[in-house]
């Protein structure tokens, strides 16, 4: 699909851009989740893959499937395969995931307190790194890996909790910084309370805030225009109040847009919101998710409904990375 957020028009091509077998008979790649969360409609299992799309004609599939060839060819896309062990690595709540991909590497994390683990998986090897705190986000920029964790002085979640930013350089050297303005009382950043942070444009984003990871001095900054944009979505669609579903949506950078994708307000919908300069320019609502087909409805920045399309219900939205 090619979408013009300002005009609310969508070009939808139903031909397969790439075909590959889905051999999933159990959740041996994605971590099993409760019934109210997950990636599949009507009990179907997701393919055992995480996807990186370079935005042109090439994708990388990180998969526990067994393919006879290391190359797959589609109508418009070609694919490289990186095989990972059949170990549940990735969690996904309607697009928000603890996995981050580049063209060669899958980065994942396992939350833990007081110590968390990062996985860096390539076709050649799998490396692990342990960090202090409960990890909520991971990203990669300019050959450096960034990880965001929450920690507390007393070890009690939500009690004077604050954020730490870790930077890992290509040599494996790790530096640690406290994120300014991130200390809150009686509040938890932890993903089981509804907060994950996704990496885009050198920032970790949550629903209404960002942490500038690559600036040299990380700071937790409230972004009112994002909050206002999600309020427009809630008001226009009569969905549940802002912040109803957990966790935060996933954020992606594409060209000059910041895209927020996720089960943002209720368990029966996917929202795709486009921001420019962190201000809402348009959004899509996809619902219902528990039927073979769904309505894809486009809206403008004011919440005015523009166009409706009938589509096959998606289990995931893949955004080009360049």
Image (tube, grey):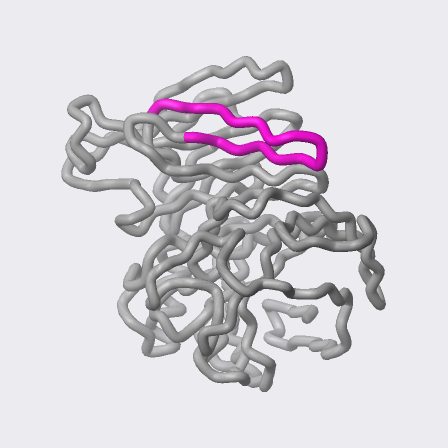
Q: Which residue is at 60% across, 68% downward?
A: 6
| Residue 312 higher or lower than 314, as above or below | below
Between 136 and 204, the one nearer to me in the picture: 136
Q: Is residue 125 magenta?
A: yes
Of residues 49 and 248, the one drawn nearer to the viewer in this rendering: 49
Depicted 307 relative to depicted 227: above or below: below
| In the image, residue 33 above or below residue 3 | above
- Quarter of the image with the N terminus is bottom right
Left or right, 312 with respect to 66, comes to left
The x, y position of residue 144, in whole percent, is 60, 25
Q: Is residue 255 visible?
A: no
Q: Could you tell me if residue 160 is visible in this image?
A: yes
Magenta-tinted stretch: 117-132
User: In the image, is residue 59 above or below residue 144?
Assistant: below
Residue 106 in the magenta stretch? The answer is no
- Viewer-proximal residue, 191 or 3? 191
At horizontal 54% and vertical 21% (from top left) the residue drawn is 168
State how many labels appear: 0
**How far across and down, in percent of the image, does residue 129 sit?**
49, 24
Magenta: main secondary structure equals: strand
Q: Nearer the viewer, residue 308 or 312?
A: 312
Q: Residue at x 62, y 43 (%)?
A: 84
Residue 37: % across, % down: 37, 63
Residue name at image x 44 percent, y 79 percent: 290
Residue 205 rendering spot, x and y as whole percentages: 44, 44
């Amino acid at each position: 699909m090619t979408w013009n957020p300002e005009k609310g028009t969508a070009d939808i091509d139903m031909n397969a851009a790439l075909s590959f077998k889905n051999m999933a008979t159990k959740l041996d790649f994605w971590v099993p989740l409760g019934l109210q969360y997950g990636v599949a409609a009507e009990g179907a299992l997701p393919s055992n893959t995480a996807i990186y799309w370079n935005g042109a004609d090439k994708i990388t599939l990180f998969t526990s499937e067994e393919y006879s060839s290391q190359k797959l060819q589609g109508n418009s896309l070609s694919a490289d395969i990186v095989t990972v062990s059949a170990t549940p690595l990735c969690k996904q709540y309607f697009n928000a995931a603890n996995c981050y991909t580049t063209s060669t590497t899958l980065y994942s994390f396992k939350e833990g307190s007081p110590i968390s683990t990062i996985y860096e998986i390539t076709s050649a090897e799998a490396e692990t790194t342990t960090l202090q705190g409960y990890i909520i986000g991971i990203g990669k920029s300019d050959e450096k890996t960034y990880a965001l964790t929450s920690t507390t002085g007393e070890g009690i979640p939500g009690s004077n909790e604050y954020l730490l930013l870790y930077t890992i350089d290509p040599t494996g050297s790790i530096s640690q910084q406290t994120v300014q303005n991130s200390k809150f009382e009686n509040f938890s950043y932890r993903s089981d309370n509804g907060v994950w942070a996704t990496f885009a444009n050198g920032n970790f984003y949550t629903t209404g805030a960002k942490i500038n990871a690559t600036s040299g001095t990380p700071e937790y900054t409230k972004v009112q225009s994002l909050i206002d944009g999600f309020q427009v979505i809630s008001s226009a669609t009569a969905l549940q109040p802002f912040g109803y579903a957990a966790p935060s949506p996933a954020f992606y950078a594409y060209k000059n847009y910041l895209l927020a994708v996720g089960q943002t307000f209720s368990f029966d919908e996917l929202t795709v919101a486009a921001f420019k300069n962190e201000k809402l320019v348009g959004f899509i609502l996809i619902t219902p998710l528990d039927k073979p087909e769904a309505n894809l409805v486009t809206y403008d920045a004011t919440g005015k409904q523009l166009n409706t399309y009938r589509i096959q219900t998606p289990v995931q939205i893949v955004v080009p990375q360049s």
